Amino acid sequence: MKNIRIGTAVITIGMAFAIPSCTGPTATDPIPRYDARTFFETTAITGASFSHDEERILISTDATGVFNAYSQPFDGGLPHQLTRSESEAIFAISWFPNDDRFLYTADQGGNELNHLYVHENDGSVRDLTPGDQSKAMFGGWSGDRDSFWVLTNERDPRFFDLYRYQTDGYERELVMRNEEGWMLGGVSRDGRWVALTKPRTNADSDIYMWDAQTPDNAPVHITPHEGNVQHSSVTFSPDSTRFYYATDGRGEFRQVWSYDLETQAHAAVVEADWDVVFLSFSETGRYRVTGINQDARTLVTILETETGKELQIPGLPPGNISRVGFSRSESRMAFYLSSDASPPNLHVLEVDDLQARQLTDSLNPVIAAEHLVESEVVRYQSYDGLEIPALLYKPKSASGSRPVPALVWVHGGPGGQSRKGYSPTLQHLVNHGYAVLAVNNRGSSGYGKTFYHMDDRKHGDVDLKDCVWARRFLESLEWVDSSRVGIIGGSYGGYMVAAALAFEPDVFDVGINIFGVTNWLRTLKSIPPWWEAQKESLYAEMGDPAIDEERLQAISPLFHASNIAKPLLVVQGANDPRVLQVESDELVEAVRNTGVPVEYVLFPDEGHGFRKKANRIVASNAYVEFLDLHLGAEPPAQ
């Protein structure tokens, strides 16, 4: 990177520095090279809560550089900024049912200790969940909208209790004291039923139903089964008569089933040859929205429940639909549409005429859409013949006569998935001449439970081999320069980067570790207290540090850092509660002591994932500058 002495510098970023504008096309490359700022000036947008008059939609955007809440007129026009945070990311949750108050959540510098706030009609803000070490989550509105549910771990940092807050005055009552480590899965709109999940391992979990009308009675187990079966809560029906849950007990993929709360009868609702990832209802249940994870894409279906007729929205360009939400009258709908080459944009429609309108245009107008790259879903064989799915991004300048360097991109997790959709980081890399293969190595979600569990307690081994064989796949492509291939990833993907450089030191030419685990013993011992209910599941996948110390040390790159021989970039947030800063500090020091080029970017105001736009720009520029130095994006002279 510019102005950095390789192997000695640690950079602590407090604010963004000036970044040059994009360079123009060259004689050999007609596609302009855009800098990171240009890509990240694309506005990130989330949220879709209708106001009580159904004329506005509550959203959050990072248009100012930090996420804030905005009111977007349904009929179009510019959004109105409602909050003005200059430091903490604010994520809007919901308008209040009968006025212009709204709920939002925010943590402190990325520490994940989110509180729940009310933005009052007069612009003042009230913290509903105070406490220096407490974490809180919104649990939904009651059916009559006179109250809402809140989960908070203020009593015991390990477990979340359930409270009911009054809409007027915010008086609250404790509904359920969580002493057993339940994961709360939702409350019926009438307030009677509470769904509780009990994880046993990462392959087995159960759902219980607690009746708030008989609070002294124990929760009832509603998913008895034999063997390993995963169950998870989905939602309650709007009339509070049925509960919907996901299960992989009837095949390879997650299906959605219903449970009749009166008769206790179970029935299949949505089945597919892919995972059903969400199901929701409009206010009265007139419409049902279903999402299916179809080969790293989201296929959304909207059904009119009474007729079974599918709601078809004409004229939409190809892409993923997400965050579908109806107004309370069910006459209006909001949703987002995105693709690899188009960031999420908010769309709305009047249900009666089904004419969708796009309200936002979040792509930076400096960028020509045709200069962005759509990924291709590919599959390659790994060391044992297993087919590994992946997304392949080919730079527009790449050809057999102009081969380009390439990167293996590893997602987070364990158990995450690289999916189609706009990523300014990926587009920045590809725009600067780096091919990217985003691998879904064994252990990734979305390809069935057998595939998902293939890496259990085999991390740093079989999953790493899948990444090694990803390089072999890239080398088979005539437009890839087989002599210049690196590996990059964040969180679990960052671990895979460090593992690749430590355990397969000759395979990759460079590595970029973005807040990756380097010492599994420490990480598993220091998980945040609010992960207590999921701890056994994590241990089932990774190992228990109390009894698996030898194996966990063997797969931890920190203890094998002397093997690392290729240039390394490490990027970390100082407030990360999942992967502590010390993980990156120690790896950098160990590699530096061997004389291998290593660079370190540390953000003092970020946690696990970077929310401030200025920091994301710095990080993305750091990736490209590091790669330009050690791989070089320009093809060799012909």
Image (cartoon, rainbow, N blue to C red):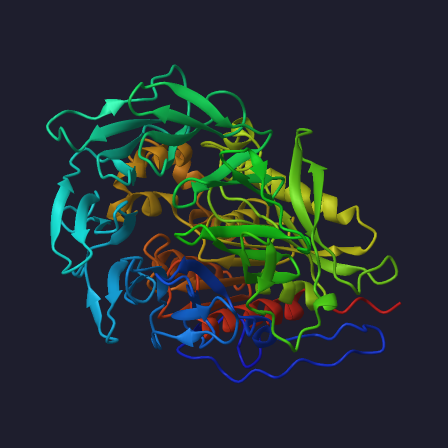
333 relative to 118 in the view: left or right: right
Foreground of the two, 515 or 289 = 289
206 relative to 512 in the view: left or right: left
32 relative to 87 in the view: left or right: right
562 relative to 533 in the view: left or right: right
Residue 422, visible in the rendered structure: no
Foreground of the two, 504 or 574 = 574
- Say which quarter of the image contains residue 50: bottom left
In what quadrant of the picture does the C terminus appear?
bottom right
- Say which quarter of the image contains residue 135: bottom left
> In the rendered image of this protein, does residue 510 appear above or below residue 291?
below
Residue at 57% from the left image edge and 76% from the top image edge: 37
Foreground of the two, 514 or 612 = 612
Foreground of the two, 366 or 390 = 366
Q: Position of residue 163 (x, y in %)?
A: 17, 47
Residue 591, visible in the rendered structure: yes
Looking at the image, the residue that sits furthest to the front is: 352
Residue at 76% from the left image edge and 61% from the top image edge: 404
Looking at the image, the residue that sits furthest to the top is: 226
Q: Position of residue 159 (x, y in %)?
A: 21, 42
Residue at 75% from the left image edge and 56% from the top image edge: 483
Q: How many marks?
A: 0
Q: Position of residue 193 (x, y in %)?
A: 24, 33
Residue at 67% from the left image edge and 52% from the top image edge: 314
In what quadrant of the picture does the N terminus appear?
bottom right
Q: Position of residue 332 (x, y in %)?
A: 48, 55
